[in-house]
Image (cartoon, grey):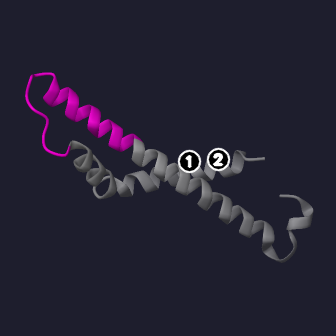
Amino acid sequence: CPKEFVCNGVCFRWQILSVSLFWTGAVLCNMLHVVVSGMVFHVLIHGGEGLPLPSNPLVRSLRHAATTSLGSICYGSLFTAAIRTIRWE
């Protein structure tokens, strides 16, 4: 952190804000990955055998990402955000 930002703990605030920014972006990106993975799963399992897709596979994948997998997504994204903040120049 530059020396002019050190007074009154401003540097610490910038670090917290940058971790928060990177964490939010990582959570959204990883939620998208989980939703797309769920859609691919539904298509490969049901579409390959000639069976009809279940109703609303996108909503089911989104619900799974926003409920069941949200804790794992947030926890993994926190580590990603911390590393990105450390490496950020």
Kind of element beneath mark 2 = helix
Q: Residue 41: image x %, image y %? A: 24, 33
Magenta residue check for 36: yes
Q: Which mark is residue 55?
A: none
In-front residue for pair 66/16: 66
Q: How many marks?
A: 2
User: Is 77 placed left or right of 88 in the picture?
Assistant: left
Name the image quarter holding residue 3. Answer: bottom right
Q: Residues within 10 Å of mark 2 (few under 14, many from 20)?
A: some
Q: Which residue is mark 1?
A: 80
Q: Is residue 28 magenta?
A: no
* Residue span colored magenta: 33-56
In the image, residue 43 sits, relative to residue 6, either above or below, namely above
Look at mark 2 in the image and give the residue it sits on: 84
**Residue furthest right in the image:** 4
**Left or right: residue 18 compared with residue 29:** right
Q: Are marks 2 and 1 in contact (CB under 8 Å)?
A: yes
Residue lying at 14% horizontally and 44% vertically, measured from the top left: 55
Rendered location of residue 34, percent (x, y): 35, 43
Kindly report the distance in space between the C-alpha atoms of the residues bearing marks 2 and 1.
Answer: 6 Å
Instruction: Please determine whether, in this image, residue 20 is positioned above or below residue 80.
Output: below
Going 72% across and 69% down the picture, which residue do you hit? 13
View extreme (left): residue: 51
Q: SS class of the residue under badge 1? A: helix
Neighbor class of circle 1 (other Cα within 10 Å; few <14, some 14-19, many 20+) is some
Give the residue type that dot 2 points to.
Arg
Relative side of 61 to 15, left or right: left
Amino acid identity at mark 1: Thr
Percent x, y of residue 60: 22, 49
* Magenta stretch, main secondary structure class: helix
Quarter placement of the N terminus? bottom right
Residue 37 screen position, x and y as percent? 32, 36
